Image (cartoon, grey):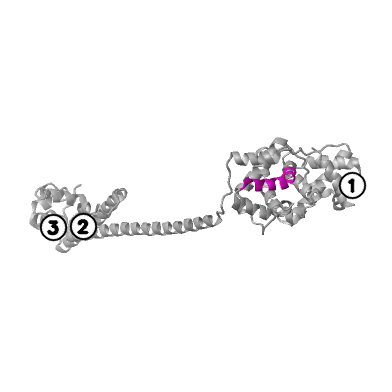
Amino acid sequence: MKQQNETDQQIIDRALHGGHRADFARLVNRYGARLFAFVATMVTCREDAEDLTQDCFVKAYTHLAQYDAQRSSFYTWLRRIAYRLCLDHSQRSPGIWFETDELTLQAIPDNEADGVMETEDDQRIRLLTEAIQHLPPTERLLIQQFYFEQQPLAVIAVFTDTDAGTLATRLHRIRKKIYHYIKSKEHGKSSI
Amino acid sequence: MENHQYSKLKAAFETTLPQMPTNFTDRVMKRIEEQDTTPQPKRHRLWLYSVIGAVAASIVLLLMLHYHDNNVETEKNTTVAQQTGSRNSTIEKKGKTPAPMIVQEEKRHPDRTSSQTPLISKEEKRHPDETSSQAPLSSSHEERNHPNEASHLGETGGGLCEQTDMEPIIPPKCQELVDIYLAETALQVAYERLAQIDALKAYTLSIEGEKEPSSQPIIAF
């Protein structure tokens, strides 16, 4: 029970100074599932996602001494490592994603696009899920972190090395893309 | 309301994600053990010192190279200036030497010079006393009278004949360029002297009212 309440920093200190790998295993247990979901959002292949998540933890263990609790939480630090690994992986094996030209995006009304995520309709949710799946990895991750993980843009900005303003603009564009995807599906057109 | 909406959407999205393996933690720890990975100590200070050291070393190296280049450049300039200056002074001292190669030849064969040099006209050969007093081209007289003068001048830095003394100073790559430069300078000086002599002769003849011999050239190359 006492061990369950230990902070990340305490576990890290013991892993560093005590040299016990079992202490680090507790951190893997704590963040493994969330980090795997994070990686799997960017890398859809299961084997690749598992390898990358393992790589992330091995890298984190190797550079554990460089973690600074004053700068970010341990999970944010893990996400930062995982994000870079996933970006490298995406660049090595690029996929085909849903893209919309700039003119089409500008023609979409802002108020309609902003409310695209707010729905209870099952059919609409199915289309939304499909649209998110067809987004590029970084955009998919932004939607997942902001809407599903409820992460503030300031935190997302830390591990993506971007500023929150840029992320807000990007999020706005992504909503328009999703809106365009859903509309084109509803009208029986496919822009993919 | 909003969270509920997103949770429904989140649940729908998560069904599309691959499932995490059950023994994921064991796999990670097994991999860490297999690689025998240990946490590395902080190295940012070491990096900092390395970078500072590298920058300092680069600056020192650049400064050294800069001074070295300046020294080499100064040596080159000094050498060229010395050779040019001494060459001119040699020619002025001798007063009759048209080209440095001839001086060298005269130095090697001091006895043959007066009879073999092509620079002296027939008239001058016929009247050696007159030539020596009037024509400044016949340097062989002086060479004959003072056979060690060339070497003496060479020691003080005169002409190509003493380039062997300068060889340690001039880099081998520049030697040919220096030779060409000196030869050209010497020729230029010689032609200027010849022109002066011609003018003097013409002036002398005009004063004396005599005609200048037209058929015999002064210089025969």
Q: Nearer the viewer, mark 3 or mark 1?
A: 1
Residue A120, x across and y down, in percent: 91, 45
Residue A147, x across and y down, in percent: 81, 49
Residue A19, x across and y down, in percent: 59, 49
Residue in view at x 79 percent, y 40 percent: A133
Specify whether A58 is left or right of A109.
Answer: left
Residue B24, x across and y down, in percent: 70, 39
In the rendered image, residues at marks 2 and 1 fall on the same chain = no
Label 2 and label 1: CA atoms lie apart by 102 Å
| Total numbered labels placed on residues in the image | 3
Decide which of B36, B19 is in the foreground and name it. Answer: B36
Q: Secondary structure at mark 3?
A: helix
Chain for numbered disc 1: A
| Circle 1 Cα neighbour tier, 10 Å, few/some/many (<14 / 14–19 / ≥20) | some
The stretch of residues the image draws in magenta is A20-37
Q: Which residue is mark 1?
A: A119
The kind of residue on which mark 3 rests is Glu
Q: Which residue is mark 3?
A: B149
Q: Most extreme residue toward the bottom, as rendered?
A: B207
Residue in view at x 67 percent, y 37 percent: A93
Decide which of B158, B24 is in the foreground and name it. Answer: B24
Label 2 and label 3: CA atoms lie apart by 11 Å
Chain for numbered disc 3: B
The label on residue B158 is: 2
The kind of residue on which mark 2 rests is Gly
The kind of residue on which mark 1 rests is Thr
- Can residue B82 be spotted in the picture? yes
Say if B191 sits above or below A56 in the image: below
Say if A36 sits above or below B154 in the image: above
Specify whether B209 is left or right of A10.
Answer: left
